[in-house]
Image (cartoon, rainbow, N blue to C red):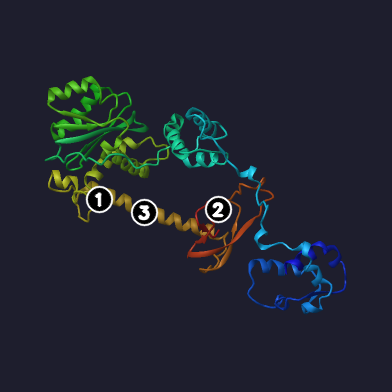
């Protein structure tokens, strides 16, 4: 079969050009089944694909009747012994794959080779494997990988610029649990936007009951003013603690607070440098403060100081998972009323507020009905979409980054499958590349 393939490759320009079918004579009877349906190897499949280019017929003929081809295959000068079949045959040029053995060179000379394949800008300070794979294409020596590993391990640039993928060193050592409320507290400052002259919050947390105190303050607070805030909002309300945990801010690490703590018998516990996990309780509480204020402050964010004490009350009145009780329940044995419980009151002021609120609600509902009536005059009923339906998405409010001009951009894209239907909106199954919310209004 290989002879047939080689012959058709050599005379292809003749065989494809002829309008007549040509005949191929062979003394291999099994080749007559070549064009029939059967399981072929990958090589045979490629040969069969090649032979479809020609209009031919394969004819079997006994070897004794092949008077032209058979004598040619038996010429003594064409015979090659099977033992010498691959003699002096080169598959790849040894020069192109041979590595230079530099075992006889000095250690410093081999270090210089590693420097070229590791430190230079075209090498890029790669790791051990990448440096080894690049170097072994050209050089080899005994102990090559170990020397490269030692070199990369002690490379200063690699140590300075690369991120460590190792696990955090050291086991966790939690702070000891206090024996009672307000004996051990944590303190920290959190920055806020300007509000009523304040731009910082002093956060104090009791490590036993998790009760908190939020004190609005300024960025210019000194050690003396911080001590005064602590006195007015913590000491006078809950007593003097025996220890205070804080970070290493300038205020907390000042000599004044250190001397004051010693005079009062308070032990100062400051976190290690760049390790806020020591006071992780307060750091986590800062996120809770921001989450609450983010919900209720106005757009200008300049009235958070009005809400900070309400945030303190809510936290202290919330049942915590750790203590399975609210901080008020721990420190006061009861939870204060929130003002929304279903309890009747006969206070005149409260009744006035209820009347005002009811009137506002009634007026709002009436205004909404009038607005709906006028708007519906210029609208059609919403289409009856069903789950699974394919719909198009309008491009009026979208911008395709790969489009130079919106004027020549498609008006609709899709279609996309409807996955959920609400009275005035549908949820679509959008591709991840389209970074918009999947719920769109039907208008």
Q: CA distance from mark 1 to mark 3?
A: 15 Å
Instruction: Work out whether residue 139 can be spotted.
Output: yes
**What residue sits right under mark 1 in the picture?**
351
Which residue is at 52% across, 61% downward? Answer: 428
- Helix, strand or loop under label 3: helix
Label 1: how many residues lie within 10 Å, few (<14), some (14-19) or many (20+)?
Answer: few
- Helix, strand or loop under label 1: helix
Which residue is at 73% across, 66% downward? Answer: 2
Q: CA distance from mark 3 to mark 2?
A: 40 Å
Residue 217 to residue 363: above or below: above
Instruction: Give whichever of discs 1 and 3 has the lower sequence position.
Output: 1
Residue in front for this viewpoint, 93 or 185 = 93
- Helix, strand or loop under label 2: loop
Query: Dividing the image into 4 quarters, which one contains the C terminus?
Result: bottom right
Label 3: how many residues lie within 10 Å, few (<14), some (14-19) or many (20+)?
Answer: few
- Cβ atoms under marks 2 and 1 closer than 8 Å: no
**What residue sits right under mark 2 in the picture?**
434
Q: Quadrant of residue 389?
A: bottom right
**What residue sits right under mark 3 in the picture?**
361
Query: Dividing the image into 4 quarters, which one contains the N terminus?
Result: bottom right
Instruction: Look at discs 1 and 3 and give the one toward the viewer.
Output: 3
């Amino acid at each position: 079969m290989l002879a047939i393939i080689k012959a058709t490759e050599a005379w292809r320009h003749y065989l494809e050009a002829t309008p007549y079918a040509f005949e191929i004579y062979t003394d291999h009877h099994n080749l007559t089944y070549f064009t029939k349906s059967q399981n072929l190897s990958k090589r045979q499949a490629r040969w069969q694909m090649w032979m479809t280019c020609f209009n031919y017929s394969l004819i079997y003929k006994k070897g004794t009747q092949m008077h032209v081809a058979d004598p040619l295959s038996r010429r003594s000068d064409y015979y090659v012994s099977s033992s010498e079949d691959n003699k002096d045959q080169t598959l790849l040029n040894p020069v192109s794959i041979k590595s230079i053995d530099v075992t006889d060179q000095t250690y410093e000379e081999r270090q210089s080779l590693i420097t070229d394949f590791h430190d230079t800008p075209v090498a890029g300070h790669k790791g051990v494997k990448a440096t080894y794979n690049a170097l072994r294409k050209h050089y080899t020596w005994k102990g090559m990988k170990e020397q490269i590993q030692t070199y990369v391990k002690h490379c200063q640039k690699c140590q300075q610029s690369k991120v460590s993928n190792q696990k955090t060193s050291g086991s966790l050592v939690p702070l000891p649990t206090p024996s009672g409320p307000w004996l051990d507290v944590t303190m920290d400052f959190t920055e806020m936007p300007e509000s009523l002259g304040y731009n910082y919050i002093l956060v104090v947390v009791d490590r036993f009951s998790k009760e908190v105190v939020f004190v609005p303050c300024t960025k210019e607070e000194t050690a003396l003013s911080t001590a005064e805030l602590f006195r007015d909002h913590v000491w006078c309300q809950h007593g003097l603690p025996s220890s205070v945990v804080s970070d290493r801010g300038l205020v907390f690490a000042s000599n004044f607070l250190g001397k004051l703590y010693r005079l009062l018998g308070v032990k100062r516990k400051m976190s290690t440098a760049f390790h806020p996990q020591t006071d992780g309780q307060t750091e986590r509480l800062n996120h809770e403060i921001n989450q609450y204020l983010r919900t209720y402050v106005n757009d200008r964010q300049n009235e958070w100081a009005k809400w900070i004490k309400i945030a303190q009350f809510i936290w202290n009145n919330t049942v915590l998972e750790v203590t399975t009780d609210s901080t008020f329940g721990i420190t006061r044995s009861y939870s204060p009323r929130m003002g929304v419980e279903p309890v009747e009151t006969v206070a005149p002021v409260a009744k006035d507020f209820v009347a005002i609120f009811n009137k506002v609600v009634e007026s709002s509902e009436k205004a909404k009905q009038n607005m709906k009536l006028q708007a519906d005059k210029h609208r059609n009923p919403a289409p009856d979409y069903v789950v699974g339906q394919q719909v198009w998405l309008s491009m009026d409010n979208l911008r395709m980054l790969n489009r130079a001009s919106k004027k020549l951009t498609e008006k609709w894209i899709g279609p996309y499958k409807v996955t959920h239907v609400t009275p005035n909106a549908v949820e679509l199954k959008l591709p991840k590349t389209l970074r918009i919310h999947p719920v769109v209004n039907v208008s």
